[in-house]
Image (cartoon, helix red, strand yellow):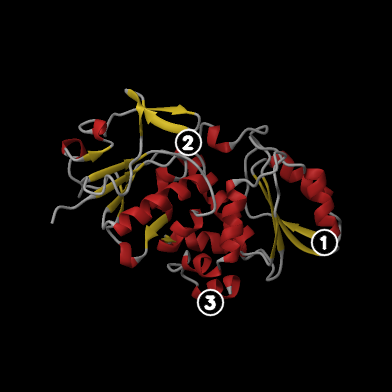
Amino acid sequence: MTQTYLYCRPTTGLNDSLVQLDWCWRVAKRQNRVLIMESNTRFTRDFFRYFRPKPAYEGRIIPHTDPSLPDLDSLISVAPANLVGRLSDFDSKNVDGRFYDSADETTLLSFDPRRDADAQLLVHFQCGGGNTGRRFLRDVTFVQSVADEILDRLRALPDRYASVHIRDTDYQTDTDTLLRKIAFWMRKGDLLVCSDNRRTLERVIASIPAAVRTHTVSDIPDLEGKPIHHAPLTPEDRHAANMDMFCDLIGIAAARRIFISRHIKGGLSGFSRLARGLHRQRTTLRGLFDHATDSAEVARRFG
């Protein structure tokens, strides 16, 4: 039987990338395809440095550089069809948040799962967030070294604590309202504070009531309010930023209570959505640490 593939090139941030991967992965599982991930974002560029598929899916989720892959440019059954012979060098154009083939701006860079089910290769290059990103994480785990480092950083946190994430770069948060909310609900105790803006992080920590002990598990750089995914990073800096991101994500999700920070336009950041989803799905959260060295710490920390 001829092997079929689904080529996914997610873009933008962590949660958006996971949402796109989740949609592609559900199609791939239903149609018995191999999911090919192209490295295109700060997160997915190094995906396999941080994650591995769970045993049932080994070989079903692979990077586009996997040596077992055929020459994808040689495949003649491709959707969208105008990417035949061009997969290695096609370019895209963003029109109102949707990506089209720059060589033919009427062609959306995606497919219809039913109409195109017979194609040997399906291609999807889109963005867009939502609440389904955590679902993809059910079928992968952190690699051992990453799981162990996250657990080591979380050891500094008490067993019971609250957490808050403040998005304050490309999206801004009304921190004054947030601080009033925290002061109302927390007269004492421990609070993990996470943000994508170092100056905001320091300002919020300085404004928390003295009886509340504040904690951090990351060391984000001061980028003068600019989002880190727009910053030029060396491979070493990118790895450090990714580890900070994962430590913040897991630290927020593992808290007994999360303070949800809405940006000034009224919505939630994708990162906050993802953390809240993992907070509500402890089984998925624990499953990310299947390869951790200290299984007792995983059970203690994630219940």
Q: Quadrant of residue 110?
A: top left
Residue 243 placement (x, y as % from top left): 53, 51
The residue wearing badge 2 is 234
Q: CA distance from mark 2 to mark 1?
A: 41 Å
The residue wearing badge 1 is 185
How many numbered circles does the render carry?
3
Secondary element type, mark 1: helix
Determine which of the numbered discs, if any, sits on residue 11 in the image: none
Q: Is residue 278 left or right of residue 201?
A: left
Badge 2 or badge 1: first in the primary sequence: 1
Residue in the foreground of this view, choosing between 241 and 169: 169
Q: Is residue 294 left or right of residue 195?
A: left
Badge 2 or badge 3: first in the primary sequence: 2
Secondary element type, mark 2: loop
Q: Amino acid at mark 1?
A: Trp
The residue wearing badge 3 is 296
